[in-house]
Image (cartoon, rainbow, N blue to C red):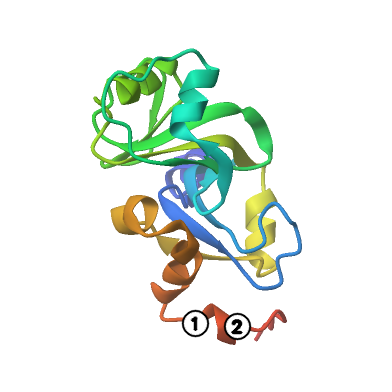
Amino acid sequence: MSETEISTSTEFSLSGQLLIAMPNMLDPSFAGSVVYLCEHSGKGAMGLVINRPTDLAIESLLEKINVEVEGYMPAHFPVMMGGPVASERGFVLHTEPLNWNSSLKVNDEISLTTSRDILEAVARGEAPGKWLVTLGYAGWGEGQLEEELAQNAWLTVPANHEILFDTPLEERFASAYAMLGIDPALMSGAAGHA
């Protein structure tokens, strides 16, 4: 087996995990944020901030892209600010099925879709079981996320459906920390290394 095969077969991936901003996070795009990682490889990472609503509701977004609402639409279902990259582009994080024109299967339960057909299904009342919509995404180049993790900018924890789709937005940050048994109010902004 060559070195390339070895490094590829043991590649570390945080896909399907949550990144939780540490108190020392100074970047205003990510301070106090929870990011769901959709992709993570040696080439970089891509995720969606899941706890920052825009002032746009899904019904308004559908109207802006000329999709007529025909079915039930939840009252003020907010569109998330998914991150600072491509903030005019929409992303739908959802449970299966994976039968849309442009989808990425994150794991056996969660997919990310960027095609209009899923929004048309939402407007008809035929949305996947659980879903959220973001504008923009968070992206990291090769080695960038690993460097931020080494600098204690983020904590990681496996994601679950409850925190992704059911926990109230204003509680997602504290709930993500609680999954680690930590109260974020007691966290220090200073990092230490042993």
Residue 185, position as x, y percentages in the image = 57, 82
Residue 100, position as x, y percentages in the image = 33, 19
Q: Quadrant of the N terminus?
A: top left
Q: Residue at x 49, y 82 (%)?
A: 183
Residue 127 badge:
none
Pointers 1 and 2 in contact (C-beta within 8 Å): yes
Q: Secondary structure at mark 1?
A: loop
Q: Is residue 130 above or below residue 35?
A: above
Residue 99, position as x, y percentages in the image = 27, 20
Residue 183 badge:
1
Q: Quadrant of the C terminus?
A: bottom right
* Image-based side of 20 in relation to 145, left or right: left
Q: Residue at x 68, y 60 (%)?
A: 148
Question: Which residue occupies the extreme front position in the image?
Answer: 75
The residue indicated by pointer 2 is 187
Q: Evaluate whether residue 41 shows in this view.
A: no
